[in-house]
Amino acid sequence: MAPNRKIIFCLIVLLLSNFTVSAFARDIRFEVTVDKNKVSLNSTVSLNLTFYGTQSINRIDLPDIHGFNWRYFGPSLKMSIINGRATRSITHMYVLIPIEAGEFSVPPMSVYYNGRTYESNPIPITVVRGPVSAPAPGTKESYGSTVRDLGDKAFLVLEAGKKKAYVNEVIPVTVKLYVNKLAIKDIYPPMLAHRKFSIDEYEKPRQYKEILNGIPYDVIEFNTNAFGNRPGELTLGPAELKCSLLLRRKTRNRRHSSIFGDDDFFGPGAFDSFFGGGYEKYPLNLKSESVPVTVAELPIEFVPNDFTGALGNYQFYLEASPKEVKVGDPITLKLVIAGEGNFNTVKNPALRADGDFKIYDPDVKQDETGKVFEQVIIPKTVNVKEIPAVTFSFFDTSSGKYKSITRGPMPIKVNPLPKGEELIIFETPEGPAGAARAREIFGKDIIYIKDSPGLLKKRGAFLCRNKLFIALQFIPILCVIFTIVFQRRKERLERDIPYARRLAAPRKAGRNLKRARQFLSAGDSQQFFDAVFKTLQEYLGDKFHLPTAGITSNVVEALRGYNIDSGIIDSLKECFGNCDTARYAQSSITKEDMSRTLTLLEGVIDKLERAKI
């Protein structure tokens, strides 16, 4: 049976392995990258063809690349396991050797694998006759006491989601830090020049990889929103980011000798690197180009009367609860405005009640998807039949037009107050502090002034000084102690069989004695003495850890070795003797004999339990 199970297990593993391989084959990603886009005529370019998700693609012969000769350098295999998920890749490495100066490009490449065709993008490469020294815009930076050109190794890019916008319209802004083969740390959020703009706080930055012109970069992306404060041809940026560049420290004195050679693992260079002394940190300031943005004023034609400045594309919903009240009872209006836009410009849509309602200021809640206004209104008379219509107007930035959404009117029922019921509402009128308060009578369901201070507590009456609270703290401790004692006792009962039997002996004897009393009451002598004999067998067997079936009157003498009182031994003999007599002369047994035997047995068990054995 075991060999069959092993065979089945091996088959399952093979099936899973085949499934995993096929899954990798279905999830292939093809990338073509270079180490530089600008190269001198006497230098070379590294070209890598990487396949993610497989390692079974063989070397690929490159097409003719104008301006270059190429050589195959070899494959590089890589496999990693992240969060339990295995990823594998193979990179075929080539070297491009320029043969003339000019503007060239690596043509798009296509690979057919496992029924699918994978293609890459063209990569531009510039070949110059002299040394390569011209940096990319904005990447000439200062660190330490020298000025170096980082070129395309590290630079900052500012992007605006819109080049044309209205005043206060949301303009998505993205600042990207591109880093290629450099060690950078201490990265601070970018500072953005925003004269005539308002800028939100940055969201949590994202980190990912991106291929730009064939060169792989590590990218840190910062996102926020900008709002133009005034119309005109404005400029957003530049963005400036501060960070630290780590460079390996140059060793000035290399004259020391070692049996391990210059690259001694235990030499000064190794220890310097281990303790952070092998690198120097230089402050680095990266700066992006500015972005022009045209900000226009809102149209002045066809402006709705109730327009309050909301910009975006919105939906408007209105709810009221309850819809049947008494005069003076509150009704809660819930006005929900959802959609996309600058929610800072969204204000509470006005309710025009013409004096039929008492209207209070709304509570406002806002998140990324909408804004909610909850407003309490109170009907003043029974003549109120409905909540008037509410209109929300906004400027739709996508269509360049004003739009209005109207909800309502909503029918309600207002019942009169019972006779003699009234509510006095005190409110602070506008005016200097300490002025007399006005009084309005609406209903009796709301009390706006607290007429009782409530429950008073003595200052300094801390909970930790409460005796009951202190006593309750011991309950968890007692529970832990009880659990430990219970667990140890359970373990001993499972491990120490004699102790477990000795502990269970009186309980089992009690159950057997109960059965014997029942037979005594029924006058069944045979069943009674069988129960007495069984009680003696089981009790003595458990008490002294003896085989129960082998216990008879002959065992009594052997119990003298347990330092048992002779009176108890004699009582045991008498109990066994009564059982033998009942077996052979049952007709001569009376109920008094049975009762005396039961009393004798109970006394024996009680004495044995009290005796120190």
Image (cartoon, helix red, strand yellow):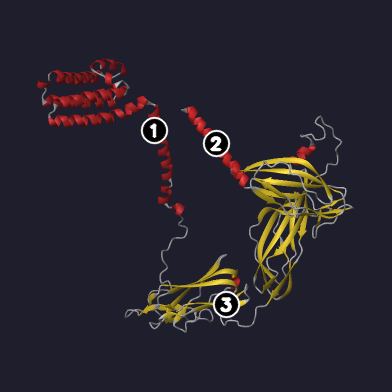
Q: Position of residue 423 (x, y in %)?
A: 39, 78
- Residue at 28 percent of width and 29 percent of height: 506
Q: Which residue is mark 2?
A: 13
Q: Residue flagged by tag 1: what amino acid is it?
A: Lys
Report, in whole angstroms, how far the alpha carbon at label 2 lies from the one at label 3. 64 Å
Q: Residues within 10 Å of mark 1 (few under 14, many from 20)?
A: few
Q: Which mark is first along the chain, 1 or 3?
A: 3
Report, in whole angstroms, how far the alpha carbon at label 2 lies from the one at label 1. 42 Å
Q: Which residue is mark 1?
A: 490
Quarter holding residue 488: top left
Residue 308 visible to the viewer: no
Q: Residues within 10 Å of mark 2 (few under 14, many from 20)?
A: few
Q: Which mark is first along the chain, 3 or 2?
A: 2
Residue 350 visible to the viewer: yes
Q: Residue flagged by tag 2: what amino acid is it?
A: Val
- Residue at 21 percent of width and 32 percent of height: 514
Quarter holding residue 584: top left
- Residue at 31 percent of width and 18 percent of height: 562
Q: Which mark is residue 403?
A: 3
Q: Residues within 10 Å of mark 3 (few under 14, many from 20)?
A: some
Task: Establish if 62 lies above or below 388.
Answer: above
In this rendering, the label closer to the viewer, 2 or 1:
2
Side of 559 relative to 28 (left or right): left
In this rendering, the label closer to the viewer, 2 or 3:
2
Task: Establish if 564 lies above or below 236.
Answer: above
